[in-house]
Image (cartoon, rainbow, N blue to C red):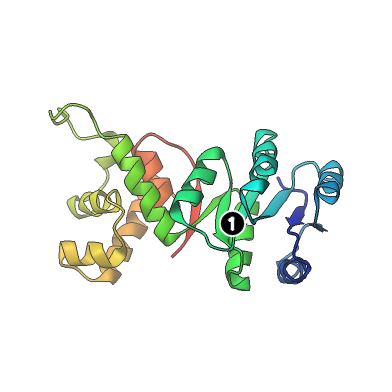
């Protein structure tokens, strides 16, 4: 459990903005602003398991982030010009989230709250990319179909299984609705039932569950 939030950026205005935003969280933990390596290390010595909001401004910051990840610190990485490749790389290394530096305050609060409650935060576009890559990486080598359906299908309807097949392609609700000739509302109903039956919280958690993982992930739709 996180015992505080460390903010790291060399931009004073951004530091103040983040602090003011996160102080409006419900029962926020201690928030410690830092703007250089010395103050960051000092904050790390004061807190046992903090969540760190790290403003990555250039590759020169990477050794610091790598060191924090190596000592198992929870990090939300924020970049001025976020992109899927960078986000995927940091999430693979163990970051708990990836976000635009100048995200709307409500979005920042959602991301922080999600990580504080044990989840990983990714945006919808990056989520779809992650599911596509995960699905590609776990495709069977043989062209022969399995002799029996997997256990996770036992309690699902045919339509719910079809919905999952499209989710594993990284498709949005709108794309799934068009492919199955149903409304987006019906897609959402199928997703709700699937999550309930399989005991997962969202799309990426569903993909990880089906393809052999066990992470809990929260995303912004």
Q: Residue at x 70, y 50 (%)?
A: 51
**Residue 117 in view of the camera:** no
Q: In the picture shown, does residue 65 fall above or below 113?
A: above
Q: In the picture shown, does residue 143 fall above or below 182?
A: above
Residue 5 in the image: x percent, y percent?
75, 54
**Residue 22 in view of the camera:** yes
Bin the neighbour count of mark 1 within 10 Å (Cα to Cα): few under 14, some 14-19, many 20 and up.
some
- 42 left or right of 219? right
Residue 71 in the image: x percent, y percent?
70, 34
- 125 left or right of 70? left
Q: Residue at x 32, y 36 (%)?
A: 137
Q: Residue at x 36, y 59 (%)?
A: 192
Q: Helix, strand or loop at disc 1?
A: helix
Which quadrant holds the N terminus?
A: top right
* Along the viewing direction, whichever of 39 and 115 lies nearer the viewer: 39
User: Which residue has dot 1 on it?
Assistant: 114
Residue 108 occupies quadrant: bottom right
Q: Residue at x 76, y 68 (%)?
A: 23
* Along the viewing direction, whichever of 188 and 92 lies nearer the viewer: 92
Residue 46 in the image: x percent, y percent?
87, 45
């Amino acid at each position: 459990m996180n015992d505080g939030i460390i903010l790291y950026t060399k931009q004073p205005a951004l530091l103040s903005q983040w602090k003011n935003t996160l102080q409006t969280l419900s029962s926020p933990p201690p928030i410690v602003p830092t703007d250089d390596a010395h103050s960051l290390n000092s904050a790390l010595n004061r807190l046992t398991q903090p969540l760190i909001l790290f403003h990555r401004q250039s590759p020169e910051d990477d050794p610091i982030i790598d060191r924090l990840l190596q000592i198992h610190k929870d990090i939300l990485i924020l970049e001025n010009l976020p992109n899927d490749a960078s986000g995927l790389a940091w999430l693979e290394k163990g970051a708990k989230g990836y976000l635009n530096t100048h995200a709307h305050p409500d979005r920042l609060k959602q991301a922080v709250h999600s990580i504080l409650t044990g989840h990983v935060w990714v945006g919808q576009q990056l989520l779809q990319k992650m599911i596509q890559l995960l699905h590609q990486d776990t495709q069977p080598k043989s062209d022969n179909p399995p002799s029996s359906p997997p256990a996770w299908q036992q309690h699902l309807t045919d339509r719910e299984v079809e919905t999952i097949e499209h989710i594993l392609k990284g498709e949005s609700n709108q794309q799934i609705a068009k492919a199955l000739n149903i409304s987006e509302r019906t897609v959402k109903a199928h997703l709700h039932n699937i999550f309930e039956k399989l005991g997962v919280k969202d799309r990426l958690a569903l993909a990880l569950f089906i393809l052999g993982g066990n992470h809990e992930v929260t995303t912004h739709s």
